[in-house]
Image (cartoon, helix red, strand yellow):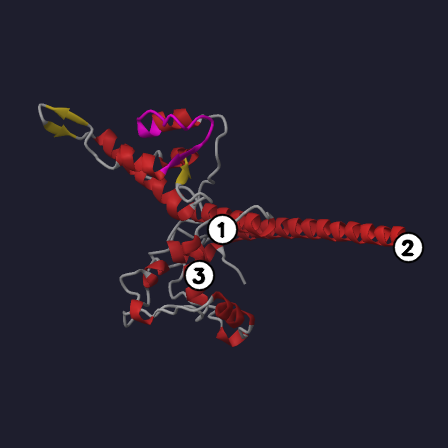
Amino acid sequence: MTITLCDVANILGLPIIGDPIYFDQQSTSSNLITTYLGVMPPDDLKGSSFVTFSWLRGNFMDLNHTMDDEEVVVDNIRIIQCTRAYLLALCGAILFPDSNGNTVNVRLLPFLADLTKPTSHAWGAATLAYLYAMLTEFATMKTRKSICGCMSLVQVWSYEHFYIGRPVTSVTSDIGVFPVSMRWSTDVVDQQHCQYKAVSIYREQFDTLQYSEVIWAPYTITPNDPEIKGLVVNTTLGRDLLSITLERAVNTTLHQHRFLLRLKQQRRLRITRRRRRRRRRRR
């Protein structure tokens, strides 16, 4: 049981089919900022591809572009640039947050170039792939101290499938709400009945979780409903391609897991042999 592309489409309302999101290594970060945002890159950018949220806020918080005889002039280009900056910050804060928590990769800008086609790229698939990559790094790298990725997706997915830690909502009926994450917004959550417990208690509840206590089909919206239609694969060919892609992803993950497990076993074997040699020398 894990987070799937269907969960991403229902919870976040993001398309899971479309053009892939990949970074073009040939374009420099400075050129991307100048081309899509119309400003000079920050001085501390250097060879990095990340800008801070404070830099975006300082350059694009105000739509006012020029002053002509004390009259504010706002052109359409400035509006588009500010919109791209806002969407870039949104991507860095929610969909693709890094371990720093205050920067975003400017290589996402080419995918925000055409604002008339916001769903032409598979943003949901990219969000899930990035989340799995960050979870893998957090689980395998000892130097990683903080977890990152779309934690809102993980949180709402847990609310939808488990009663453990689920807050109480103040609305009487939330059937058909889309995206599903709106069920758990701060406007509808009853803060007086929120569950605040120690981490050890939650761990014990998850360890003793029974099959009957899991909500296996939490979503009431189907792929044919207008809200989600077009975000998911509806054709037989599309489903086959998606199945093949997921199968390859699972096989790759299993291969990596087995490889890491084999490395751990070899490391333990070497440690055991060293200990035996030391014992023999002492004798």
Closer to the camera in the image, 210 or 208: 208
Q: In this view, does 268 lie to the left or right of 31?
A: right
Q: Position of residue 164 (x, y in %)?
A: 45, 70
What residue do we see at 30% from left, 67% from top? 191
Label 1: how many Cα within 10 Å (few below 14, some 14–19, many 20+): some
Q: Is residue 156 above or below residue 103?
A: below
Residue 181 seen in render: yes
Tell me the distance, in whole angstroms, between the alpha carbons under discs 3 and 1.
17 Å
Q: Are marks 3 and 2 in contact (CB under 8 Å)?
A: no
Closer to the camera in the image, 186 or 122: 186
Tell me the distance, in whole angstroms, between the alpha carbons under discs 2 and 1.
47 Å
Kind of element beneath mark 2: loop
Q: What residue type is labelled 1?
A: Ile
Q: Label 2 belongs to which residue?
A: 283
What residue do we see at 51% from left, 47% from top? 129
Q: Label 3 belongs to which residue?
A: 157
Q: What residue type is labelled 3?
A: Trp
3 or 2: mark nearer the eye? 2
Q: What stretch is highlighted in magenta?
A: 35-52
Question: Split into 4 quadrants, where in the image is the N terminus?
Answer: bottom right
Label 3 vs 1, first from the N-terminus = 1
